[in-house]
Image (tube, rainbow, N blue to C red):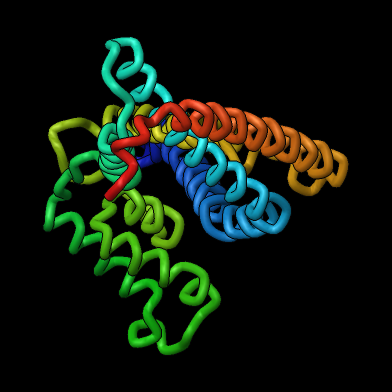
Amino acid sequence: MELSHALQPDPRLQQLQQRCAELRQLLRQLTQQWLLLHTEEYTRRQRLYEQHFHALEQELEWLAWQTAQLRRRLELLLVKLQRGEPLTAKAMRLIEQTVEHEFARLRPRSERTAPVEPAEEELARLYRLLVKRLHPDSTGEETEEYRRYWLLVQQAYRERNVEQLRRLVRVLCEEPVGESPVCELDPLQYWQRELARLEAQVRVEQQRLRRTLAQEPFSLPLDDPEWVRQHRAELERRIAQQRAQMQWYAELLRRLSCAVAPEDLTP
């Protein structure tokens, strides 16, 4: 009787294992939702946004760029005038060259972060798992999952994006839930720690999903015709405002340029 009782599974252990299995499933669902947002839904929303606003935003960007250059020319010209320096054709050419040089340096500037080198072993391990799970050479056919995820796998591997590969593995590769691994902890302690780890991972993915949905283009009501109309009107208003400002700077520069010393105008 005592031996039979000792061989019965601990109900606490069973509950922990069941809860861990539920959390793994939830984690896969959250990760899959995040991946779909950043692939299919992002592409759809980006296409919609460009369809509605791309031309207007390009025009606004060009006007802002031109206005900034005119403003800078005016600043340099006023500095010379305030110093009492003669306004000559040579000085105007120097101002022009200075502005062109400054803006040539600024144009390609972008935020750059040093890439973090992933562990080669983990990168290769994750990639092998996904190849085995998806590639037709392993599965015997070109599955729907292969068509949906294979390009993502290749992109993540080329970019050495270990975190993205981890998410794909989490979605696509089932983790077997069975006996506790051999370790220093007893089974109950192991599954308690595993539960805490999975709960923390779920919180992280939920927060990540909330942040994603709060960012553009996901936060924009692109399917609402009234919002689209209002946003177009706002962009058109800003374009008109920017064009007026650019014309004001251009006219002021034209008037000040009339004061260029006549004798210096000859080549």
Residue 141 x, y percent position in the rendering: 46, 88
| Residue at screen point 67% across, 48% down | 56
Count of number-bearing discs: 0
Which one is in front, 202 or 60?
A: 60
Q: Which picture quadrant has residue 104? A: top left
User: Observer-nearest residue: 1 or 127?
Assistant: 127
**Is any part of residue 224 visible from this angle?**
yes
Depth check: give the residue in front, 89 or 77: 89
* Extreme residue in the front direction: 263
- Residue 3 seen in render: no
Q: Is residue 263 left or right of residue 226?
A: left
Which quadrant: the N terminus?
top left
Q: Is residue 185 above or below residue 66?
A: above
Residue 189 appears in which quarter of the rendering?
top left
Residue 190 x/y as whole percent: 27, 33
* Residue appearing at x 42%, y 40% in the figure: 17
Residue drawn where x is 37% and y is 57% of the image: 169
- Residue pictured at 37% horizontal, 35% vertical: 262
Q: Is residue 142 above or below residue 107?
A: below
- Left of 230 or right of it: where is 46? left
Q: Looking at the rendering, which quadrant does residue 165 occupy?
A: bottom left
Q: Where is 111 relative to 48, above or below?
A: above
Q: Is residue 11 left or right of residue 213?
A: left
The outermost residue toward the right is: 226
Which of the pair 259/102 is nearer the observer? 259
Instruction: Pinpoint residue 21: horizontal percent, then vertical percent.
Output: 46, 45
